Structures are given as C-alpha cells and as structure tokens.
Amino acid sequence: MAGLRVAEIHWTSPPVIGGVETHVECLSEQLRDSGTQVDMFSGTADSTAAVYRQVLDIEAGQPTTEHLTALVSELSGYDVVHWHNPQWHKPAVTIEVLQRIQDAPGSVTMMICDIHNLADDDTQWRVLGDDRWTHTLVHSDFVRSHVVQRVPARQPAVAPLALTRTPDASPLTAWKGTLVLQPTRLSRWKGSHLSLRAAGELLDEGLDFTFVHAGAVNRVWATDLDEVLEGCDRWIKADRIRMISYGWRQSWSAIAQADLVLHPSADRGIRGEPFSLSAAQAVITGRPLVASTSGNLPELLTSYRPKRLVSPGDYGELKTAVREMLTAGYGVAAATDTALGRALATSFASAGQWHRAVFAELASASSRSARC
C-alpha cells in the first residue's frame, strides 16, 4: 500500500533504556527504510527519538481535554496507530483515546495493541480485552499463551522484535580478570539483587573477575537496591563491581566483549521475562550465558549449549552456576548455536518488513470495508 502512515506510540522512549524503547526505535527506523511514513510519540520530554506528547507523560497528571483532543486529532490522520504496552501506566488515558478515535467522523484508523509485558491486574486486562483494538501483537509464545487464556477472543500474532546491529564502540574498558556482564536494567525484576550479591561473595572467595551491571540509570521503575549496593561497596570501590549505563547501539559491542553474560530474571508466572533482547544478543554473539527459567528464557535458549539455566529467584542456584562457569569453563558454541544466532539476527533485521506487510494488509482491508 503506497503512502502508508504509521504512528508508533509508547509511554517512554530513548534516552530511557529498555527493551520496548529499543524495539520501537529500531522498528521505526526499519519501517522508514522500507518506505513507510512513521512518527514516534512518547511521554519522554527529552526524548532523542520521539515526539513528546503530555498525554503520554507518566510523570504528568491526568491530561486536559484540550491535550486529549489534540492527540486524537493528530492520530486520526494515520492509517495505523501501533501502541506498545497500552495497558501500563495510564490505562484510563488509553481507553479515552480509543473511544475518541472510534467516535471521530469517518475514522478508518487501525488501532493495534502490542503487548510486551504482562501483569495480573484487572484494569490492565480490561484495556487489553477492549474490542476497539483492530489487531493484537505479542512477541513470544509465552506472552501469547497468557493472553489467549485470559482473553479467549484475542488471537494475537507473534511478531518479531526489531533490533538493528550497529558497530558503535563498547563502553567497557580496562577491567581486571574475566569480564562478567549483566546487560539488563538494574532492578529486582531482572534479578539484580541476586547477581550483585553473588558477585560480591564470589569475589570474597578469591575468584578473579570484574562484574559489570548495565542499566544503572533507571528513570521509570524504582531500583530498591540500596541495601544490596551497600553490601557490595568494598568491591565497587575496588572497581571489581561496576555500574554503568549505555544505549542499545553500544549493547552489541558490550555483550560481544563479555566472557560471561548473566540474565537472572527473578519473576515466575505471568510477570516472567517476556522475551529478552539481551539474551538473544548473547546467543547471536556466541557468549556463554547464565539465565533463569523465567518466562520466555527457557524457550529462547532451549537449544543453545554454552549456558546454565537456574530457577527464577534462586540465589543458591545462581551463585553455583556462575562459580562453575568461571572455574570449570563455559563450553563452546557449536554449529547449531551459530545457526540459532543467525536466525535471531535475521528476525531482528527483518522485523520492519514483517510489520509493514501486516499494517498494509490491515489498512487495505479497512479501506475496502469503508467503501462498502
């Protein structure tokens, strides 16, 4: 469909760091490369990638009628509005926008609900189950199974995530011993309290490594790790435990440098790891990995050999697995692991083409329906 216009929406965008923020920016770039007209909207006032709209600002209060009207008028000019995690942060705003767009005279805008993360929250599920969504997307069978179970009328398609590989220089320099990297956001959900404690105790035992934790600047979710960080103070001062932040463009080189990657997401059940771009990057770059069996991780890593899987939230298992990987060796990526990495890389690189095809078909179907 020529001249397809798409609005990509998420509550936050870079410089806020996260998997959804990364996907939306990369997807928008890939869609533009395919000839699609794309605009990104978010509630991040200092965004480097998206147009700021106060209605989407999670730190602002309830939007005024004037702001809502302006946003709806703006979005009604697009063929497709692709809203990522619309159920989070301000669900009442999402419902209001859906209703206003539906009520707009002659509106044929397709409203696509893209579900990245889940929670057992009735208000959020009312948003996800709203019948004004034209189409629903998810990014793993793990998330899809929960959506279908909770909202049987929804049959979401499993869409590829977008992540563009870049040559940007690594932010990691001058470490001592083996380099162990946790490339996730610093949070209890990602198991940071477990990995930091394990790193400190293994350094106490005399193992020679430097543990680097990414995602230290957390602008959305409370870290709640002060006590854990205080316990690591000795090793932080010795620069054997290091907290840093970097964007997705530097993530490729950072992960490729690591001798061992950690991804100990701690939640079980519905709040489990929904996909994990950084674990997939570890596979693509052939890095040894210690990960939990939270959410999609065991499915993602099922055939990947240089790994250890541990139970979500199990500190003892995590510490033992890291010790074994550091002392007994990591294992070497085999041909099947390389093939898995290539498949993931291809999926990330072609996500824009996949989404454009879906958007074009939905928009075309809507146009035919409007003419009938």
Image (cartoon, rainbow, N blue to C red):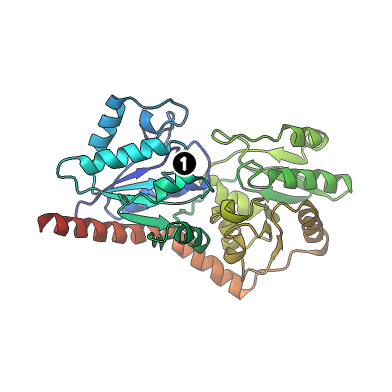
Query: Residue extending furthest right?
Result: 205
| Vertical position of residue 85 compared to residue 290: above or below | above
Quarter holding residue 153:
bottom left
- x and y, in percent, of residue 149 in the image: 48, 61
182 relative position to 132: left or right = right
**Residue 276 visible:** yes
Which residue sits at x=53%, y=40%?
Answer: 17
Quarter holding residue 56:
top left
| Vertical position of residue 321 compared to residue 335: above or below | above
Q: Indicate the quadrant containing the C terminus: top left, top right, bottom left or bottom right.
A: bottom left
Which residue sits at x=53%, y=44%?
Answer: 18
Query: Residue extending furthest bottom?
Result: 335
**Residue 41 visible:** no
SS class, disc 1: loop
| Vertical position of residue 60 compared to residue 269: above or below | above
137 relative position to 310: left or right = left
358 relative position to 163: left or right = left
